[in-house]
Amino acid sequence: MNKKTKFLYWSDKQKISHVSQGLFRSSYKTINSFKGVSLLFQKVGFSKNPRNPKDFKNKYKAKTIKGDTIVIDEASGLMWYQGGSSRFMSYFDAKEWIIEQNNKGFAGYYDWRLPTAEEVISLLESNKTSNGMYIDPIFSQQQSWFWTGDKFNSNRAFVVRLPGALLVDSLLVNFSYVRPVRSL
């Protein structure tokens, strides 16, 4: 990674403001300054401090619909792909891949999208699983890096890195996996 890569870590120092509502922002944002990014993530429990156990308690339930496995989080009101893309792809290709999945109607739904940063935060676990990831083992571990729909500026978007529970900004032409989400 280059020196310009920026990291944010999960922390429970601050309460997640919308836990009681059970809703997360589902529209994407472009944040042009890192100060703006820090303020945004502090609202949902992110800070620059090392990871600490989180307040938000997920309530996952895996389900197979029409042969496709999804994970419902009853605590956040989100439905996730249990896995995601089988290959790395650019941000642009990720958006196209989502369109293709919606055309197919994965698990009978046609409104899948890239997650927002807040939605990704809700997945992060405070402790590593046996394979070194910070995500519940109900999810596929293959998608160790995946895109969010939120951008840092016109040529960078945010990617979650599960081996370190990090949110990093990445050039749109770089490669990552896709783990789609939809609101219930």
Image (cartoon, rainbow, N blue to C red):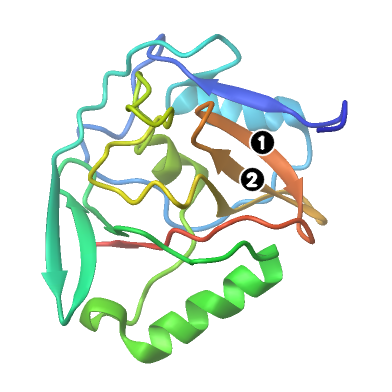
Q: Is residue 145 above or below residue 67?
A: above
Front position in the image: 30 or 72: 72
Give the amino acid at mark 1: Val
> In this image, 107 relative to 149: left or right?
left
Which residue is the extreme one toward the front? 131
* Residue for point 44% across, 43% down: 120
Which residue is the extreme one toward the bottom? 103
Q: Picture coordinates of residue 42 (x, y %)?
A: 51, 22
Q: Is residue 13 above or below residue 44?
A: above
Q: Quadrant of residue 63?
A: bottom left
Front position in the image: 143 or 3: 143
> In this image, 163 relative to 121: left or right?
right
Q: Picture coordinates of residue 87 (x, y %)?
A: 57, 65
Q: Which residue is mark 1?
A: 168
Q: Picture coordinates of residue 34 (x, y %)?
A: 75, 29
> In this image, 96 relative to 139: left or right?
right
Mark 1 residue element: strand
Q: Which residue is mark 2?
A: 158
Residue contact between numbered discs 1 and 2, judged by CB atoms under 8 Å: yes
Q: Picture coordinates of residue 83 (x, y %)?
A: 36, 59
Q: Quadrant of residue 121?
A: top left
* Residue for point 20% across, 28% down: 57
Give the amino acid at mark 2: Phe
* Residue for point 67% across, 26% down: 7
Measure the alpha-carbon separation of dots 1 and 2. 6 Å
Q: Is residue 179 above or below residue 69?
A: above
Q: Which mark identifies residue 64? A: none
Which residue is the extreme one toward the right? 3
Front position in the image: 87 or 117: 87
Disc 2: CA contacts within 10 A as few (<14), some (14-19) or many (>=20): many
Disc 1: CA contacts within 10 A as few (<14), some (14-19) or many (>=20): some
